[in-house]
Image (cartoon, rainbow, N blue to C red):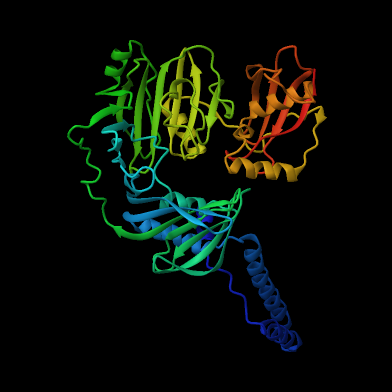
Amino acid sequence: MDTVRKVRSLKEPVFPEGDYSKKLAGKVLGQLSDKKPGRKKRGIWAAAAAAVVILALLLNFALYPKNTNIVFAMEQAFKEIKAYHGIIEIIEKNAEGKETVQKVREVWADKNGRYYVKELEGSETVMITANNGEKKWQMRFDEGKVFIFPSFPDPYQFTFELGNEIDRIKNAAEVKTIGEDRVSYREAAVLEVTPEGGEPYRIWVDKETKLPLKRESAMLNAIQYVAVYTSIDYHDVLPEELIAYNIPEGFEEIDKNPEQLVSNMEEAEEMLGFSFKIPNEILKGYKLDSVSVIKDGKSAKLNYISQDKENRVIVFQGKAEGEFNPASSAILGEIDGNIAEIQSPVREEYGIISGGGIYSGITDITSIRWQEDGLEFAVVGNLSLNDLASFVKNLWDGTVVLLPEDEEFLDKPQIEVPVDLNIEENEQKSVDAGHSPWKLDPVYVAQVFVSLEISPEGIVGNYPVNYEDIKVIKNNGIEAVLEVSGDVSNISKVYLKKLIRQDSTGIWTVVGYDPL
């Protein structure tokens, strides 16, 4: 990581002037022809050194196509600000260039994840959403209701939140400057950002502040979306009166936060009626923030927070109910020899973290869930998968966490299925545009494949193979092996792979199978 930070801080490569090579050749030739003792040897070393310098510059240019200068400047600029306030317009634009303003909203946000969003124009002009770090609420004036949610995990903030936007640019496959423009009366550099396996989109970066001002998505199905700060300013603090929870007179409060705070672990055990594993150590830099009991009386919730208050982790414990069934799209690992469901990010809710819909979707939230000794555990946080695994290892003595590596060798199929990459690329674009979401579910992809093998002329009515008859037995996030049960099909295993994009948004493709 130290090396990566240094590479990011590099300036763009600067090459010598056009006649430098001639001057260098003349200089070296003069040194080589010098008859004085020792000069010849020094001349050879000088030429070699010069060649190494030029080669290093060429390698730097070839190996780092990303515009590290601007990306690093954005990252550093965002570190310097504490809070910001702006007006955002969300615009829909069709292939003919016609623009329609969908939403206009006022936003306040700070570096601790707290925010205040007020809809000014659009379909939700009578709504305020806020999160003060302890409570999240949504005030709907047309209904006269206030809905209360947990402050964390919080999959929704708002479109074009600066921190998330800069993270996406940092992780892109390529970033290049393609021009200059004016946005909201500010001079801006226009960047083309190409995400891994995705379509290029554009970002306008304020030349003065080095922060994003506008984003234009790729054109999909003749539609693209533009998010732009028509005004933005930066502050030391987010006004406390905006994030102080107050219910307007006559409003009804609807609590969607199904938990009750308790003073300590003993109180939680007393309310639940059973003992659970008490963590004896946590990852350095974190502290226990609160303990609560889920109102169904079946599980406890331990909230941890980092010292800088940027990262949060929740540890759930409760009685195991029935057989452990991982989410179909989950990576499979092991904890103390037990199968562990790993979601990075969380897309489906099963077991102890199910209910309420607060975790699902494409977010920065990661989870690890497993069962052990009659209990079910889940650890959820806005950390990377490796950091969350380290957190789990530190909770209890001797805990062994095994994560599947991307390079893990999975069994090869007996029969390979030919793949047309052009078709798969178009399928990926279709899924990106919101169509055929089943291609993100390996079980569903295998079900369709096996069913079409049984009925190649097409499927009428129900699939001949049930969804429940297909089970994921290996999944490292890029490759997966699924087992087919029942006596309807002559296929025993299906092999899938993410060929176009190897992250949570990548589609699954059948690459082979084993016959019975």
Q: Is residue 41 visible?
A: yes
Quadrant containing the C terminus is top right
- Which residue is more in the foreground, 516 or 387? 516
Where 128 falls versus 70 (above or below)?
A: above
Is the residue 396 above or below the residue 311 in the image? above
Q: Residue at x 63, y 66 (%)?
A: 61
Up-down: is 479 above or below 46?
above
Of 505 and 465, nearer the camera is 465
Residue 161 in the image: state x and y as whole percent.
41, 50
Is residue 362 rendered to the left or right of residue 303?
right
Q: Which residue is pictured at 47% across the width and 30% down the height? A: 393
Q: Position of residue 423 (x, y in %)?
A: 73, 42
Displayed quadrant of residue 51: bottom right
Q: Residue at x 51, y 50 (%)?
A: 168
Q: Determine the image quadrant of residue 491.
A: top right
Along the viewing direction, whichever of 162 and 466 lies nearer the viewer? 466
Q: In the rendered view, does 280 fall on the left or right side of 512?
A: left
The residue most toward the left is 249
Quadrant of the image occupied by residue 263:
top left
Q: Give whichever of 344, 459 is nearer the camera.
A: 459
159 to the left or right of 487: left
Q: Is residue 165 left or right of residue 441?
A: left
Residue 81 pos. (x, y %): 34, 57
x then y, percent, for residue 394: 43, 30
Q: Is residue 82 visible?
A: no
Which residue appears at 34% of the width and 15% of the height? 297
